[in-house]
Image (cartoon, coloured by chain):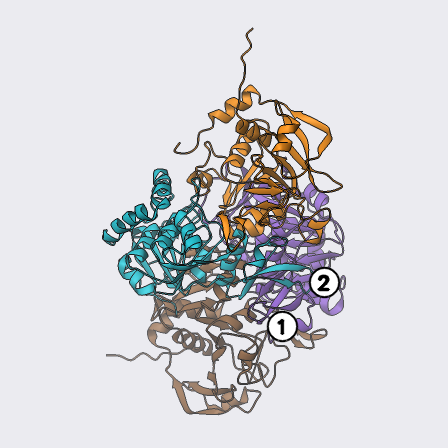
Chain colours: A purple, B brown, C cyan, D orange
């Protein structure tokens, strides 16, 4: 049933209610509107054995992997955009530190279509992709289907239906309807594909004034909304703040070394929840 | 009249050569970094109606400055249209309506296949790379692919460790057999020169050298017996306007 | 190659250039922004043996069928919305007047997904639909596929790629970029699925000011733009005019009788092109 | 104190009964005409947070007046969100996230299957009807379907001429076998009363009569041996507020 009760609750409570050990969790945001604050709260609450799903695992997943939240990573491009590699992810893959990490690897088009299938209530999606590449040898959620009309063979990818999707948006109204704009990424699909959705927002407003290019997600497809100003920092929140590029560069240094990272993690865990 | 000596770096030559490969009115699927610089350079010089498309969902982007990342707000603000990531891949890239796609990689082989996934074995890699991103479908679906990467012996290999993005497979006819509808890599622009697939063999051969580079240098940085085109050209050096415009382009926040 | 030359040309020329006898032609607009003027021009130019594609054949297709333009109709709901039946369509089906009419019938979801597949460069689309209905017995562009991951059987529909798609939009800029808003229907998909696209617009403006909920179609996916103020009348053009409901009711009378319809047709054909 | 006698038409009773079937906070896939009137009546009375969704792509529509057609601008202007037609079917209806769908038809059979395609043979119809529209997928995917149509002998038939929208197929278990995930028609509201599927047989049985209607009238307008529920109810007559609100709702341009 459509949910009419707005669930605007603090982030710590939302994470506690919605994200459980062993869940498949997608934090989405295509370089823009990355839900950093929610990821940090998941680290603080010491969630374990998560399957982390994200097209572009970058700093936030490097941090969560380094903190030991993840058992598995489902992704299509992993790096520190414009800076370099993800050292915590590499350490987990190569040395199993702090936990072994399995991977399930796709292309962007494959991941996007997996969310589309999930949002559409379909078990799989069809695309032109993967043909001739080595990815299908290593990823069992890639297969093929044959067109019943032309006989042509196409790629099929398994639907993604996360237990929880977490996204950050610019604002929500008091009923819990959410509005986001600028680069839209795959957030609508990731929310609609999820069993439960958590949205952090910059602010609550009385009315969601229509804006060019904005997407509105109705309250009844969202489990909880948490007000977290700056919740996407150090990434972008269009109309609110730009990326803090120094933080992206600094992460390269922090993350190279387990001990330096440990210091970062301790100070994060000692910080208070939003 | 005085003559000023113009100097440039190898990377600048590579960017300029890439920008020259774009024709006015084309649509171009652009990645951050050198491709974005080259495409925006072309748009400022000989191709004012070049249509730039970024995988974050912006169509007809006309940024005043170079985007810092694929999520940069300048891409949305200066775009004719902003669409979702699924839409950019499904409605725009996949049907083959984009003329040119830029690719790069850690490894490229003699048939233009590209590796951005792992060096070494997939399960026990020597180096774990970022992975696919949008590259496999750019390689499959753009009408033409232009590869831009520095020519080094460890990168220009006889056979890639992992095929992330298909070039010409293992030879002529492979793309058609695989159902890939674009022409694949038609040109590999390096800091030394230009390689193009031989129509008969699909193998990359040297078709141009940048000013001041020798065949021996190019051969020394290529992991297969590099054939030299009988019509080997020399790339014109960067013009003053090209260098000035390239150097004048600021990156957002930079 | 992307087309950079704006082709803003008169409607008569656009129809003459782009719509040929025997073509598969889609005039789209989901009750809103129906390209009536373009349909009338096709009638005036006496196109024949068209396959007419449209989710909701209503007055405009009843007129084109009555005028003898159509050999085949591909559709999912045919009626005069809020008024009643399409008498010219019924006459063509039952009596072959003025030309026999074949039909290819789908559901809305099926038609929408056929355009999506066409726009996506795929030969077919997958949906949950048709199962248990009698439509697959009569429509050979409906089939099934089996999910390679779950074994579940789903419906498959063949992609639609019209030779020409015609839509009406509120405005275009001088470069031929088109902007439409309000109820969006399936216009973007129908345009992107087509080999050639013709857009009629209310007006040309210097700049397409961004508007909430607006979709922009770049000039390079459009073959021709024609300026036709009122080109969607008597249907709606959001922000410009509402539906002329009296015209919809009047059509019921005009279309019931071949002779009355003939009078209407004569006066249309004697009218000048836009 | 004076008592005013309230009178109403059979169609008004049907609309009121349909509106009462909607619960506050539900999401409802609405068609133009009686369903739109019933849903908007419910929203004005007992279900202010009813979420209205129209197949033209509007989500959370709150029209001040009833839309004249599915393309009416009032639907877009008063909506929380407007999406494309493919999106409304694929992302919103198909996954089963909509609670209630309204359907009607030219024929309905004892198992709630509905015909809106042809009377007679498909290739040589006696009457050609509009066809499917969004109905087959509403019938398949909404969590529950409520059918609203006048009860007439020619319409309530033992077996429909054409299955446009599947109700309970040919009996219990058929929906699951066909992969239809919603519950199908849970209630058929007519101008005479209410029919509901018997849980054991999936056949529509009479569970309520509207005030003043007899079992014999209902049987006379039903083309199969209509079973009567042992718990046969009588529908409460329209209240003054219901009638006043229903009659006060203007249609756009009307």
Along the viewing direction, whichever of B248 and A177 lies nearer the viewer: A177
The N terminus of chain C lies in quadrant: bottom left
In the rendered structure, the answer to whether residue D212 lies left or right of residue D245 reads right
**Where residue C253 sits in the image (x, y, percent)?**
35, 41
- Considering the numbered disc 2 on the image, is that residue within a helix, a strand or a loop? helix
Residues beneath discs 2 and 1 located on the same chain: no
Q: Position of residue D67 (x, y in %)?
A: 45, 36
Q: Residue at x 70, y 59 (%)?
A: A65
Residue D167, percent across and down?
64, 45
Q: Tell me: C17 left or right of A166.
A: left
Q: Residue at x 38, y 67 (%)?
A: C2
Say which chain tag 1 marks. B
Q: Is residue B33 left or right of residue D164?
A: left
- Image marks 2 and 1: residues in contact by CB distance under 8 Å: no
Question: Which residue, as the protein is rendered here, is positioned at the far top?
Answer: D1
Above or below, comparing residue D61 to residue D181 in the picture: above
**What residue did someone put label 2 on?**
A258
Front tag of 2 and 1: 1
Q: How far apart, in angstroms, are the residues tagged by discs 2 and 1? A: 24 Å
Residue A133: which quarter of the image?
bottom right
Q: Nearer the viewer, residue C45 or C175?
A: C45
Q: Chain of mark 2?
A: A
Res B117 label: 1
Label ID, residue A31: none
Q: Which of the 4 image quadrants contains residue D224? A: top right
Q: Is residue D23 visible?
A: no
For this rendering, which residue is in front, D196 or A111?
D196
- Name the foreground residue: D215 vs A95: D215
């Amino acid at each position: 049933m459509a949910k009419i009760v707005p669930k605007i609750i603090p982030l710590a409570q939302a994470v506690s209610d919605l994200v459980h050990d062993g869940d498949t969790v997608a934090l989405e945001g295509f370089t823009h509107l990355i839900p950093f604050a929610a990821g940090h709260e998941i680290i603080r609450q010491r969630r374990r054995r998560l399957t982390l799903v994200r097209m572009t695992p970058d700093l936030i997943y490097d941090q969560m992997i380094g903190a030991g939240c993840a058992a598995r990573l489902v992704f299509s491009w992993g790096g520190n955009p414009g800076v370099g590699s993800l050292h915590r992810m590499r350490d987990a893959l190569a040395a199993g530190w702090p936990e072994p990490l399995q991977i399930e690897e796709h292309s962007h088009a494959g991941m996007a279509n997996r969310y589309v299938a999930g949002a559409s209530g379909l078990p799989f999606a069809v695309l032109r992709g993967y043909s001739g590449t080595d990815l299908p040898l290593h990823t069992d959620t890639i297969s093929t289907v044959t067109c019943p009309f032309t006989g042509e063979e196409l790629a099929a990818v398994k639907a993604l239906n996360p237990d929880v999707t977490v996204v950050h948006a610019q604002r929500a109204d008091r009923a819990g309807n959410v509005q986001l704009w600028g680069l839209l990424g795959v957030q609508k699909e990731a929310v609609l594909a999820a069993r439960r959705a958590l949205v952090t927002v910059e602010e609550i407003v009385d009315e969601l004034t229509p804006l060019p290019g904005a997407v509105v997600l109705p309250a009844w497809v969202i489990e909880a909304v948490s007000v977290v100003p700056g919740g996407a920092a150090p990434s972008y929140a269009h109309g609110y703040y730009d990326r803090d590029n120094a933080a992206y560069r600094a992460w390269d240094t922090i993350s190279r070394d387990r001990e330096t990272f440990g210091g970062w993690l301790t100070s994060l865990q000692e910080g208070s929840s939003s | 009249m005085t003559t000023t000596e113009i100097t440039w770096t190898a990377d600048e030559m590579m960017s300029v050569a890439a920008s020259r490969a774009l024709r006015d009115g084309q649509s171009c699927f652009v990645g951050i970094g050198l491709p974005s610089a080259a495409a925006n350079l072309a748009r400022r010089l000989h191709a004012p109606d070049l249509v730039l498309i970024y995988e974050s969902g912006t169509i007809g982007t006309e940024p005043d400055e170079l985007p810092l990342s694929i999520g940069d707000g300048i891409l949305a603000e200066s775009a004719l249209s902003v669409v979702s990531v699924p839409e950019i891949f499904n409605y725009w890239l996949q049907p083959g309506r984009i003329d040119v796609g830029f690719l790069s990689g850690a490894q490229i082989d003699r048939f233009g296949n590209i590796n951005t996934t792992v060096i070494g074995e997939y399960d026990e890699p020597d180096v774990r790379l970022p992975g696919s991103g949008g590259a496999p479908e750019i390689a499959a679906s753009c009408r033409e692919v232009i590869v831009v990467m520095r020519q080094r012996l460890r990168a220009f290999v006889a056979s890639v460790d992992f095929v992330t993005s298909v070039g010409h497979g293992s030879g002529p006819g492979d793309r058609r057999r695989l159902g890939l509808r674009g022409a694949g890599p038609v040109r590999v622009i390096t800091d030394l020169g230009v390689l193009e697939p031989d129509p008969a063999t699909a193998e990359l051969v040297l078709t141009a050298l940048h000013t001041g580079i020798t065949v021996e240098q190019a051969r020394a940085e290529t992991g297969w017996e590099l054939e030299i085109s009988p019509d080997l050209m020399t790339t014109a050096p960067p013009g003053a306007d090209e260098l000035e415009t390239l150097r004048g382009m600021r990156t957002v926040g930079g």
